[in-house]
Amino acid sequence: MALEMRDRCERCETAVLAADGPARICSYECSFCVACADAMTGVCPNCGGELVPRPRRAAAAPAGAAPDA
């Protein structure tokens, strides 16, 4: 089962969380931008769990782009 890569901060809802960019996540996959996670001192407001750096995924190649060889 793959990690859900949410694309918006759950606190400010304005920060775009790119799959290959920085974000913070708890064990329930609540997702926050770094600025909001820092403001909440690394504690998830939903479950009280620790917010840690979210793993990054490679950005998807644009449609029609040739794969790297």
Image (cartoon, rainbow, N blue to C red):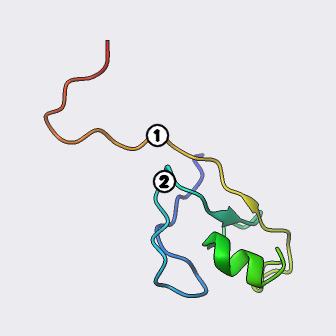
Q: Quadrant of the C terminus?
A: top left
7 lies above or below 13: above
The residue positioned 60% from the left and 46% from the top of the image is: 1
Compared across the picture, whether 15 is left or right of 47 comes to left
Expressed as whole percent of the image width and height from the top left, the position of residue 32 reads 63, 73
Mark 1 crowdedness (10 Å alpha carbons): few <14, some 14-19, many ≥20: few
Residue lying furthest left: 64
Which secondary structure, mark 2? loop
Residue lying furthest top: 69
* Residue 5 or residue 56, whichever sits in front: 56
The residue positioned 82% from the left and 74% from the top of the image is: 42
Report which quarter residue 23 is drawn in. Answer: bottom right
Mark 2 crowdedness (10 Å alpha carbons): few <14, some 14-19, many ≥20: some
* Residue 2 or residue 44, whichever sits in front: 44
Measure the C-alpha gap from mark 1 to mark 2: 7 Å
Expressed as whole percent of the image width and height from the top left, the position of residue 34 reads 66, 70
Identify the mark nearer the N-term, 1 or 2: 2
53 lies above or below 42: above
* Residue 40 or residue 28, whichever sits in front: 40
**Residue position for label 1:** 58
Which secondary structure, mark 1? loop
Expressed as whole percent of the image width and height from the top left, the position of residue 47 reads 81, 80
Report which quarter residue 63 is drawn in. Answer: top left
Mark 2: amino acid:
Ala
Expressed as whole percent of the image width and height from the top left, the position of residue 5 reads 52, 58
**Residue position for label 2:** 19
Mark 1: amino acid:
Ala
The residue positioned 61% from the left and 86% from the top of the image is: 11
Q: Which mark is residue 22?
A: none
Q: Badges 1 and 2: C-beta atoms under 8 Å apart?
A: yes
